[in-house]
Amino acid sequence: MGLLHTYFVAESDERAAGAVEHGPEQSGFDAVDLPDVDPIIVLATVEAELRGEDEESVEDGPRFATVIGDTGRSWVYTVTDELQRAVAAATPARLAEVAAAVADEDDDDDPEFAVNALAGLLGDLGELSRRAIAGNQRVYAWVGL
């Protein structure tokens, strides 16, 4: 069984960290499951593509995948404000371009399906990010075993 990845909206790092033990959905947060969208590996590449930056500069950002909650079996990570704004503003066509650049086509029997699936997941992240921005909140990632 792989890792679970759920992205959610919270008004502060402290509130977000409170979701670490039971997960954001059970803790009452606005959340969306994004299978295989790792907050470190995948989001670094997504943010770099969306912003036209290199991955290293993205990873050097102050809020890039900072662990704010850790049980040893589940973790809460920050998501950068820059990614939140960029994915919220991106059109479906732009997200499809990013997905094509990011999807690991070598690891899937159907590369077109992998790209389309990732584009859909990025669209879901964009919707969540728009809700966060509208509520003056931030997006976080919960990862569990």
Image: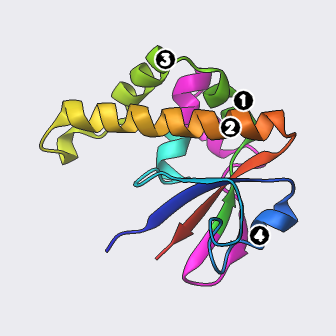
Q: Picture coordinates of residue 48 (x, y %)?
A: 56, 30
Distance from the alpha carbon under mark 1 to that under mark 4: 21 Å
* Amino acid type of the residue tagged 2 in the rendering: Ser
| Viewer-side label of 1, 2 | 2
* Amino acid type of the residue tagged 3 in the rendering: Arg
Q: Picture coordinates of residue 30 (x, y %)?
A: 68, 53
Residue designated by label 2? 129
Using residue 92 as the reference point, say whether residue 80 is left or right of it: right
Tell me, yes or no, whether the highlighted magenta stretch contains residue 132: no
Q: Which of marks 3 and 1 is nearer the N terminus?
A: 1
* Amino acid type of the residue tagged 1 in the rendering: Arg
Residue designated by label 1? 85
Distance from the alpha carbon under mark 3 to that under mark 4: 31 Å
Q: How crowded is mark 2: few (under 14 residues within 10 Å), some or many (20 or more)?
A: many
What is the secondary structure assignment of the residue under circle 4? Answer: helix
Q: Earlier in the sequence, mark 1 or mark 2?
A: 1
What is the secondary structure assignment of the residue under circle 2? Answer: helix
- Residue range in magenta is 46-75
Tell me, yes or no, whether the highlighted magenta stretch contains residue 47: yes
Distance from the alpha carbon under mark 3 to that under mark 1: 14 Å
- Count the numbered circles shown: 4
Distance from the alpha carbon under mark 1 to that under mark 2: 7 Å
What is the secondary structure assignment of the residue under circle 1? Answer: helix
* Residue lying at 63% horizontally and 78% vertically, measured from the top left: 22
Residue designated by label 4? 17
Q: Which of marks 1 and 4 is nearer the N terminus?
A: 4
Circle on res. 94: 3
What is the secondary structure assignment of the residue under circle 3? Answer: helix
* Residue lying at 34% horizontally and 26% vertically, measured from the top left: 100
Determine whether label 3 and label 1 are within 8 Å by CB.
no
Q: Picture coordinates of residue 2 (x, y %)?
A: 35, 69
| Viewer-side label of 2, 3 | 2
